[in-house]
Amino acid sequence: MPDNNVTIRLTDEMTEALDSFRKEQQGRPSRPDAIRRILTDYFISTGKIPFEDDEDG
């Protein structure tokens, strides 16, 4: 399935929080990668998408 392009606007407060999150992450992900990580964690924790263990693959 191809990726979809989604454009969002963030408040200054959300941008600052996102950048703070990025600084805490190993390898300091780009803003788009950080947003994908945050959304993935949320969707897994709420059961919207299944957990896939990356260590096996």
Image (spheres, rainbow, N blue to C red):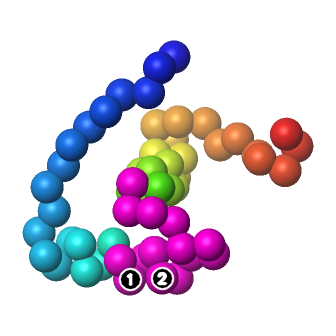
* Residue at the disc numbered 1: 20
What residue do we see at 33% from left, 72% from top?
18
Tell me which amino acid carries mark 1: Ser
Q: Residue 30 shows which numbered tag? A: none
What residue do we see at 65% from left, 43% from top?
51
**Marks 2/1: CA–CA distance:** 5 Å
Q: Write down the quadrant of residue 34 in the picture.
A: bottom left
What residue do we see at 52% from left, 82% from top?
24
Q: Nearer the viewer, residue 14 or 33?
A: 33
Is residue 3 among the parts visible in the rendering? yes
* Residue at the disc numbered 2: 23
What residue do we see at 45% from left, 51% from top?
36
Q: How many marks?
A: 2
* Residue 41 counted in the magenta span: no
Q: Write down the quadrant of residue 38 in the picture.
A: bottom left
Residue extending farthest to the top is 1
Q: Which residues are magenta?
A: 19-32
The percent position of residue 28, horizontal first and vertical second, equals 54, 73
**Where is 34 relative to 51, above or below?**
below
Q: Are marks 2 and 1 in contact (CB under 8 Å)?
A: yes
Q: Secondary structure at mark 1?
A: helix
Q: Residues within 10 Å of mark 1 (few under 14, many from 20)?
A: few
**Where is 7 relative to 21, above or below?**
above
Q: Report whether 18 appears left or right of 54.
A: left
Tell me which amino acid carries mark 2: Lys
Q: Nearer the viewer, residue 52 or 30?
A: 30
Q: Report whether 32 appears left or right of 29.
A: left
* Residue 21 counted in the magenta span: yes
The percent position of residue 41, horizontal first and vertical second, equals 51, 55
Image quarter hosting the C terminus: top right
